[in-house]
C-alpha cells in the first residue's frame, strides 16, 4: 500500500508552478464531481498558500490563477463554438440529403421518360441520329408535362437546373453554379469550424503563457472530441464527399465559377486545410484579444 503524499510537508519550498498545478487540479476535480471530491484538504491548500506568501510567490500565483480563470472561460467559449459548428453542419447535411433524395427521384423519373419516349423504336434505330432527335423532342415534352417544382427545384444539384433540357442531350455543358443553398450552408459551416479553431488557438496560447496545463483531463478529452468533429468536416469524407464533385467539375472546365453565390466556395472545397487555417494576421489578432483580457483591470 502506497503511503499518501504529505502535501503540507512537500509545500515547503515548492516552485510556484507546482503549487499552481496542485491547486488547479483540485479545482478541476471538484468541478468534475460537482464539489463532492477534491485532491486537497483545506489544511493542505492553506499550507500551499502560506508557503507561497513566505517565498514571495503570491504575485506569480495570482497571475497564474488569472490565466486559469480565463482558460475556464475559454473552455465554455469552445463549447459554444463547437455547438454552433454542429448546428451549421446539421443544416448542411440536411441540404445534402435532400439533394441526394431528389436527385435519385429525378433520375428514376428520367428513366421512365426515356422508356416512354423511345417506345416503338428498336435498339438499332435508337443509335440513329435522326431517331435520337425525335426521342429527345418527345422526352422534352414529357418532362414538361410531368415537371415537378417545389422540393425538386430547391434541392437540385445546380442552379439554374440542368434538368430543364432534354434528358438525353449529348451536347450539354454545365453553365450554372452549385446549389445556392448548399453554397451558403457550406460556407457557414466552414466559418464556424474556423471560429472553433480560433478558440482552441487562444486556449493553447493561454497555456503557453502559463507554462503549465490549466484545464483538467476531462476538459481535454471533450476538446479532443470537438476537434475530431471539425477535422472530419475538413476532410469532406463520408456524407460530405459529394461536395467535392463541384471542384472536380470546375477542374474539367464544365462548371462556370464566375459570380458564384459564395465567391470562395470552389477554392475552399479544393483546399479545406487552407480555408480553415488561421492566417498569421488572424493569429496575431487572436493573441492580442487574449492579451487584452489578461491585462484588463478589474472594475
Image: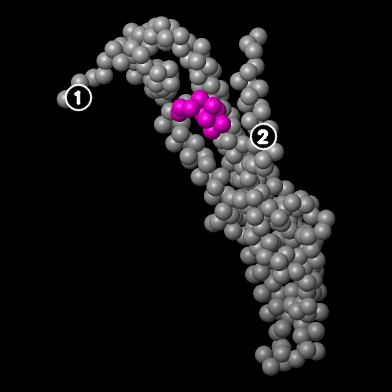
Residue 51 placement (x, y as % from top left) = 38, 9
Question: What segment carries the magenta color?
Answer: 203-213
Q: Which of 278 and 135 is in front in this view?
A: 278
Residue beneath the point at 59% across and 39% down: 197
Residue located beneath label 2 in the image: 284
Sequence-first disc among 2 and 1: 1
**From the viewer's perspective, is residue 173 above or below residue 71?**
below
Query: Visible in this render: residue 281?
Result: yes
Q: Distance between the residues labelled 2 and 1?
A: 48 Å
Tell me the element at label 2: helix
Closest to the camera, between mark 2 and mark 1, is: 2
Residue beneath the point at 30% across and 11% down: 8
Residue 153 placement (x, y as % from top left) = 75, 58
Tell me the element at label 1: loop
Q: Residue 2: which disc?
A: 1
Residue beneath the point at 26% across and 15% down: 6
Residue beneath the point at 60% across and 20% down: 294
Residue 204 included in the magenta stretch of the image: yes
Query: Badge 1: how crowded within 10 Å, few (<14), some, or many (20+)?
Result: few
Report the residue that reaches farthest toward the right: 259
* Count of residue discs: 2
Which quadrant holds the N terminus? top left
Query: Badge 2: how crowded within 10 Å, few (<14), some, or many (20+)?
Result: few
Type of secondary structure dominating the magenta stretch: helix
Residue 254 placement (x, y as % from top left) = 75, 69
Query: Visible in this render: residue 83?
Result: no
Amino acid at each position: 500500500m502506497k503511503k499518501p503524499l504529505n502535501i503540507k510537508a512537500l509545500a515547503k519550498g515548492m516552485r510556484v508552478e507546482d503549487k499552481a498545478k496542485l491547486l488547479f487540479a483540485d479545482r478541476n476535480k471538484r468541478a468534475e464531481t460537482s464539489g463532492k471530491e477534491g485532491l486537497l484538504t483545506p489544511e493542505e491548500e492553506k499550507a500551499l498558500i502560506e508557503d507561497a506568501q513566505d517565498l514571495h510567490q503570491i504575485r506569480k500565483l495570482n497571475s497564474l490563477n488569472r490565466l486559469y480563470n480565463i482558460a475556464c472561460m475559454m473552455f465554455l467559449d469552445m463549447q459554444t463554438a463547437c455547438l454552433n459548428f454542429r448546428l451549421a453542419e446539421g443544416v448542411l447535411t440536411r441540404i445534402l440529403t435532400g439533394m441526394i433524395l431528389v436527385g435519385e427521384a429525378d433520375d428514376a423519373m428520367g428513366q421512365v421518360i426515356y422508356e416512354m419516349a423511345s417506345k416503338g423504336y428498336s435498339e438499332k434505330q435508337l443509335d440513329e441520329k435522326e431517331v435520337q432527335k425525335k426521342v429527345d423532342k418527345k422526352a422534352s415534352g414529357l418532362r414538361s408535362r410531368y415537371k415537378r417544382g417545389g422540393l425538386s427545384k430547391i434541392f437540385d444539384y445546380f442552379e439554374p437546373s440542368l434538368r430543364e433540357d432534354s434528358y438525353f442531350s449529348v451536347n450539354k455543358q454545365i453553365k450554372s453554379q452549385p446549389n445556392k443553398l448548399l453554397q451558403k450552408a457550406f460556407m457557414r459551416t466552414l466559418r464556424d469550424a474556423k471560429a472553433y479553431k480560433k478558440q482552441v488557438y487562444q486556449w493553447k496560447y493561454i497555456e503557453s503563457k502559463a507554462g503549465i496545463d490549466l484545464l483538467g483531463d476531462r476538459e481535454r478529452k471533450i476538446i479532443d472530441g470537438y476537434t475530431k468533429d471539425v477535422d472530419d468536416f475538413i476532410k469532406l469524407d463520408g456524407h460530405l464527399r459529394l461536395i467535392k464533385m463541384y471542384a472536380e467539375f470546375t477542374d474539367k472546365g464544365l462548371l462556370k465559377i464566375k459570380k458564384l453565390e459564395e465567391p470562395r466556395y470552389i477554392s475552399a472545397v479544393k483546399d479545406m486545410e487552407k480555408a480553415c487555417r488561421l492566417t498569421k494576421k488572424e493569429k496575431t489578432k487572436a493573441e492580442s484579444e487574449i492579451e487584452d483580457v489578461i491585462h484588463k483591470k478589474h472594475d
